[in-house]
Image (cartoon, coloured by chain):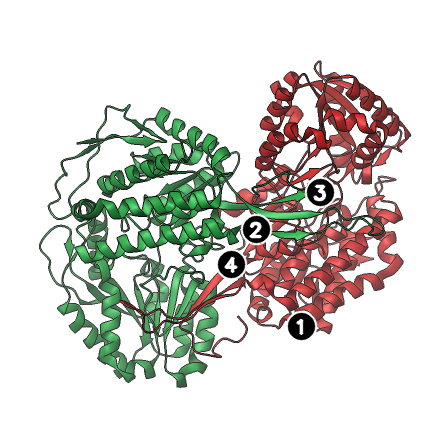
Chain colours: A green, B red
């Protein structure tokens, strides 16, 4: 099977080059071949998206909702074919894939509802005051307006929920922005199946040609063409800090800068106060180990740093954590890049004089890795900023503090995060509060007595946070407010009734 | 009189260098001397602002409102001293100064009300669902949170309303962000008077030391230190495209990029449809000439481009416009930089083969310039992007079109704008609508049958627009929503009652 690029309602395959997906379990190329987009194809996709924008933004909310609901239905109709393909490309267990598929179609339906309700328009109105002295006031009506063609770079770890028909795409389509998806190299086949569903849904529901395109190609080269195209209005990216920053820089260096929403690394620190550790050490260890190793630790909200006092209670927790990790399976990582980074990260920890690897075991297959836990003293952690960075996968670093003051110093020293959590007993409020005051400066979501994995899709979610968690901490990538990234305000002054119907 | 920098509650004068304001009427230095901030003083101001942020963000809305209201009262109490100083530094007539002062204190009081009402918090709440299957939902509460210390670069043309206690400053202070103002070189004395009022108001109402600082200094060198300081969280700027872009680039190139809201140039095109011109040519000419020359044409919403069909009606309008301009006084521009740019711009127009200067007269004093009107054919305009750029001052370029199609081509070719306007008769809806559809892509505010000058301060104002009008078209610099630039969302998950009171 050869799979083409999808440019609006056309399949397109101009390049003679070929791409392949890799099976993470066998490390062999999968059979299907994929054709990367040429520069001309990239340009065509963006030009089509621009033309589509002029029509699509005037399509009614009900019609856009029908389009999004049709995509959801189409993804469900792919049934086991999609599940099996995603399994081949990710190595995820079926249960994990089904959860992600459910979330993806639920998100599409939620944004369909948003398209109809139109609360994202945030309409405000100031009536004319013709008799006001010294100057009359004209009528002013303000509404949010779709920003234009949006380019989305999907995430390796969420082929459905953060990729081809994921939250970025659904939220942009809901508010009237056409989308061009750059398919992730790791799951070209999953992308192809979903992209075809979107194309067919667009045709079936009468959307304009160009409202959606899907392009294969090298992340950096194709990405650069997409971000630099003068008709591109905004960019969504989920992935590494290196990649996200590179795209952000390209976006800001343009003659006309554009917003680039890169969601990047995060170590999601968890501060463990002693009375809470004591309460039920074993259950806490199980909860933490579960969050560390869920989906092979390949969640952007995986807790990479634990912070606790250096005392007997923490010693007990350490032992219990090692037991839980010992009972956990090896994690099959998504691709060779990720498993190589993980192995290198663990090797560096092993060779470090300051850090002690207290749980790790040898693992067999190339992409299968052992969960790992390491321990470091607070002062060593503070002296070595490299330890503050993410090792993507099922690893956490436990930072041992001599005092609450050191705990606060750790909080102060951390980079920006998607989340930060505090485990505390009621009696520990006075200790927790100053810690939380610092964590608010560092993270988009602050959690009490809960692990960071499990990102609720709702109005009140903030999936975002200060750099390097994201390149723009004023927005969320998950939940209904994700639409705000693709909008800008426009005011209509002194407009006669009925001149503009759809704004 | 020697005026120092104000750093929190301290006056500070470490530098041996001296700065002066220039009287635009005489081109001579005014008597007072001003001391620029050293690098150490810049750092101190930002560090103090950071420390103040941790206290100020927890100050109640009522207390912040008392602070803002006290500033408004203090500005009024300066009375004629402030008016006379501003007159010396701007050459503005007293009536113009009083209007700006009224707007400034009204803005402060509006943002005081915002501080109390707290609608900018945009609080949303999703209650816990402990019995949900397969996983329970934790409670989630989302609120907007002040982003941190804000640096404001005031505007040459609005020493009060867009500078020391202007909209950027008042909106940031209202939501809990400390502010450091870089005083504009053109009105150091006006800045000093207002800055002292703010310092005293902060002391009187018990605000934390560092909530406000005012620094003198070279725009680029001092500006660079301020924007690059790691504790600076956001920047507001109003001025030239060169300056605004330079600060934007500095902000984006930081290790941790920050939002830089530069409001820059705009030609605020006005499209004049023939039936409307015919209706009352003389009144229309008076309205246009008034908007062109108001405050010496030194408004960011001054209409620099007029677009009309090349026909008898436009000929009549042209004549009427020249008559109105002939009756208008010369404009005294704010400083030598502005008058030099204006004179150069007019000289280039004079020397151009394509453009015909149809109104201009010789003017005497250095900073006093004649209003000017030039005419160009649409195809020549399209071929020469230089003509699309702003000549700051009382100048407009009339673009003559052979057809409505050419009019649309002009709209398509324009850069981003703060505003765009269409003058039309009811019978011209069908002609206006496609034009408006293009103008929405280009501007933050679209006006029917009105001039762009006169920016209403209210909920529904958008004072912003696509680049190069601003560096971030997703926000407004005027009106209640101006607060949104200084906020980011934070979600509190599973928080026990009463743990965080003020969020």
Distance between mark 4 and mark 1 Cα atoms: 22 Å
Q: Quadrant of the N terminus of chain B?
A: bottom right
The residue that appears at 19% across and 76% down in the rendered structure is A319
Distance between mark 2 and mark 1 Cα atoms: 29 Å
Using the rendered image, report if marks 1 and 3 lie on a common chain. no
Count of marks overlaid on the render = 4
The reply to whether the C-beta atoms of the residues labelled 1 and 3 are less than 8 Å apart is no
**What is the chain identity of the residue bearing mark 2?**
B
Q: Which residue is mark 3?
A: A494
What label does residue B227 carry, if any? 2
Which comes before the other along the chain, label 2 or label 1? Answer: 1
User: Which residue appears farthest toward the right when viewing the image?
Assistant: B327
Q: Nearer the viewer, mark 2 or mark 3?
A: 3
Q: Which residue is mark 4?
A: B488
Q: Left or right: B218 with respect to A387?
A: right
**What is the chain identity of the residue bearing mark 3?**
A
């Amino acid at each position: 099977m050869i799979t083409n690029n999808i440019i609006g309602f056309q399949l397109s395959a101009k390049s003679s080059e070929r791409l392949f997906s890799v099976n993470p379990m066998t490390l062999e190329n999968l059979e299907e071949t994929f054709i990367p987009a040429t520069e001309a194809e990239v340009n065509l996709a963006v030009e089509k998206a621009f033309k589509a924008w002029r029509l699509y933004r005037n399509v009614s909310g009900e019609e856009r909702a029908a389009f999004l609901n049709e995509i959801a239905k189409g993804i469900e109709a792919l049934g086991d074919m999609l599940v099996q393909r995603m399994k081949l490309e990710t190595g995820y267990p079926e249960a994990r894939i089904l959860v992600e598929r459910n979330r993806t179609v639920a998100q599409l339906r939620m944004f369909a509802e948003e398209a109809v309700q139109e609360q994202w328009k945030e309409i405000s109105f100031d009536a004319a005051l013709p008799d006001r002295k010294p100057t009359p006031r004209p009528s002013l009506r303000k509404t949010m307006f779709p920003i234009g063609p949006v380019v989305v770079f999907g995430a390796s770890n969420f082929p459905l929920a953060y990729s081809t028909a994921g939250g970025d795409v659904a939220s942009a389509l809901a508010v009237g922005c056409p989308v061009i998806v750059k398919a992730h190299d790791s799951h070209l086949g999953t992308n192809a199946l979903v992209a075809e569903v979107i194309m067919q849904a667009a045709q079936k529901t009468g959307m304009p040609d160009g409202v959606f395109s899907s392009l294969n190609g090298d992340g950096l080269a194709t990405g650069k063409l997409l971000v630099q195209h003068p008709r591109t209005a905004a960019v969504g990216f989920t992935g590494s800090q290196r990649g996200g920053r590179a795209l952000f820089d390209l976006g800001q260096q343009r003659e006309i800068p554009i917003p680039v929403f890169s969601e990047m690394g995060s170590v999601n620190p968890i501060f463990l106060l002693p009375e809470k550790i004591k309460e039920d050490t074993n259950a806490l260890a199980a909860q933490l180990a579960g969050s560390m190793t869920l989906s092979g630790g390949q969640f952007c909200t995986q807790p990479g740093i634990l912070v606790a006092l250096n005392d007997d209670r923490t010693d007990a927790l350490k032992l219990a954590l090692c037991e839980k990790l010992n009972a956990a399976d090896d994690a099959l990582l998504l691709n060779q890049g990720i498993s190589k980074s993980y192995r290198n990260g663990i090797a560096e920890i092993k060779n470090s004089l300051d850090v002690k690897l207290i749980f790790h075991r040898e693992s067999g297959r190339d992409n299968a890795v052992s969960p790992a836990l390491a321990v470091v003293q607070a002062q060593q952690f503070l002296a070595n900023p490299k330890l503050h960075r993410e090792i993507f996968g099922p690893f956490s670093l436990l930072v041992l503090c001599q005092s609450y003051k050191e705990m606060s110093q750790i909080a102060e020293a951390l980079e920006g995060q998607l989340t930060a959590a505090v485990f505390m007993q009621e009696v520990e409020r006075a200790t927790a509060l100053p810690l939380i005051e610092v964590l608010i400066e560092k993270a988009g979501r602050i959690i009490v007595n809960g692990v960071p994995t499990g990102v609720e899709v709702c109005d009140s979610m903030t999936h975002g946070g200060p750099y390097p968690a994201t390149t723009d901490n004023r927005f969320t990538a998950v939940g209904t407010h994700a639409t705000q990234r693709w909008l800008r305000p426009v005011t209509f002054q002194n407009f006669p009734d009925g001149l503009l119907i759809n704004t």
